[in-house]
Amino acid sequence: MTQATAITPVIGKKKEPAPSIAGPKTLDEPKREAFIPKPPASFEEAGLDPAIVESLIVKYLAGVGTATGGQVAHELCLPAEPIIAFLANLKLQQIVVHVGSAGMGDFTYRLTDNGRDRAHRYMRESLYVGPAPVPLDQYIAGVKAQTITVMHPKKEDLARAFSDLLINEDMFAVLGPAINSGRGMFLYGYPGNGKTSIAERITRCFGDDIYIPKVLISDGFIIKLFDGASHEVVKTESGSILKKDKVDPRWIKIKRPTIIVGGELTMPLLEIQFNETSNTCEAPIQLKSNCGTLVIDDFGRQRMRPVELLNRWIVPLEKRYDFLTMPNGKKLQLPFDQLIIFSTNLEPKDLCDDAFLRRIPYKINVDDPSEEQFRKLFDFVAPGVGFEMNAEAKKALDHLIETHYKPNNRPFRCCQPRDLMLQVRNRCRYMGLEAKLTPELFDYAVSVYFTVM
């Protein structure tokens, strides 16, 4: 293995959310005020052209048939008063008509024949209907205000983030500075020792939640940024209209993202993807992971060559911004503001050259646990799996190590205590036996867990 710091983590018993860590902790910077996108009072403050607003309104009415001005404003995530005034102007143009009163100066609206024709023309341009988009300049300002580069987690922050893993002090001593750098790291070593588990929890060290726009707009193109599969929504307090009004509803509050991609990663996922059917765009993974962590798992086993990915990101890793191409050929400069983690079972020096390794300053070898650490794993994991490490269980563990590990020179792996105990638990459930660890059950678990040709 490459000469680098070797540390031995231990995989935990279960995934539980770490306690919230409020605010950054730095040596030389005051606590920053939390970024909150303020609700716009007008379309101008929202950075929206009236034509975009009209397009969203008539396409929405074409889909639902009738709606009040308040309902339209709620769907578009825009202030009600400008929307109601805008609908009144559309009525003068005979695009909509009143079909009822909704009170407080509002009405129920429906498209006219002219309005439906206009909606069809807008749909040919884009099928998108939903929250109004946020201009790129407002998004970039939001990223700068919530950047991870000014977040400097301390040892206690790491302890909270990794509370469901058994991590030794040597690991914290290396991970802490690497996370504080905000620039990226290689986690490498044999499979099963917790590289992915470590990477998944690193974002928790940064603590606070962030706001991102649901969709962006550039040159008339809608770019979908929020992804329910990648972003975890933070529930906000309900029951107070005043509290809701303090946040621009076009933005959504999420936990700092941790996006993990593995062998499915291809070059198109790193670019803005255009859907020719809906005429909308999907943000690339690095944009979705801004202000968080992007984990390239099983690096070196993607369908593209490692050098292609490294060449694509060699400048963004250095400059912390990326250039993306829009469907019309225009280049956009956007923030590249995340902690990049490359997790691999291969040697970093075999995957990339010195120029790229220089841009990933931390190479951490996640090594095999010692026998002592391996035994501690059973104590740590057993309660979560449903076992008690009593005297009988410890004798069974002695049998496991002396019979199935030492004679075969089988290396210890951090995932094995959990996996073997799960095999035993499933066997006990099937046979209707009491859940306990015995030499015979460990013999069974080994026979089905390890492959012997």
Image: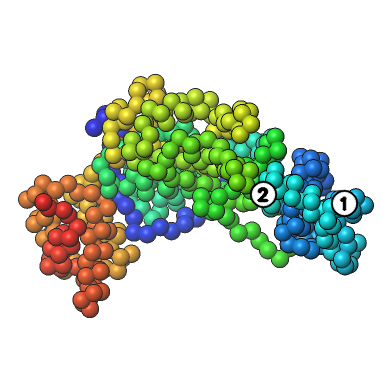
Which residue in the structure is indicated by mark 2? 127
Three-letter amino acid code of the residue under disc 2:
Leu
| Residue 270 percent across, percent down from the top left | 49, 36
Looking at the image, is 23 positioned above or below residue 327?
below
Disc ID at residue 291: none
Three-letter amino acid code of the residue under disc 1:
Leu
Contact? badges 1 and 2 (CB < 8 Å): no
Q: Residues within 10 Å of mark 1 (few under 14, many from 20)?
A: some
Q: Quadrant of residue 149?
A: top right
| Residue 36 percent across, percent down from the top left | 68, 46
Total labels drawn: 2
Q: Residue at x 82, y 53 (%)?
A: 115
Q: Given the current orientation, which residue lies at the most extreme right position?
A: 92
Q: Residue at x 41, y 28 (%)?
A: 308
Q: Residue at x 47, y 57 (%)?
A: 17
Q: Is residue 433 visible to the viewer in this orientation of the structure?
A: yes
Give the SS element for disc 1: helix
Quadrant into which the N terminus falls: top left
Q: Nearer the viewer, residue 219 or 6?
A: 219
Q: Given the current orientation, which residue lies at the most extreme top position?
A: 355
Q: Is residue 21 visible to the viewer in this orientation of the structure?
A: no
Looking at the image, is 307 positioned above or below residue 214?
above
Which residue in the structure is indicated by mark 1? 90
Q: Residues within 10 Å of mark 2 (few under 14, many from 20)?
A: some
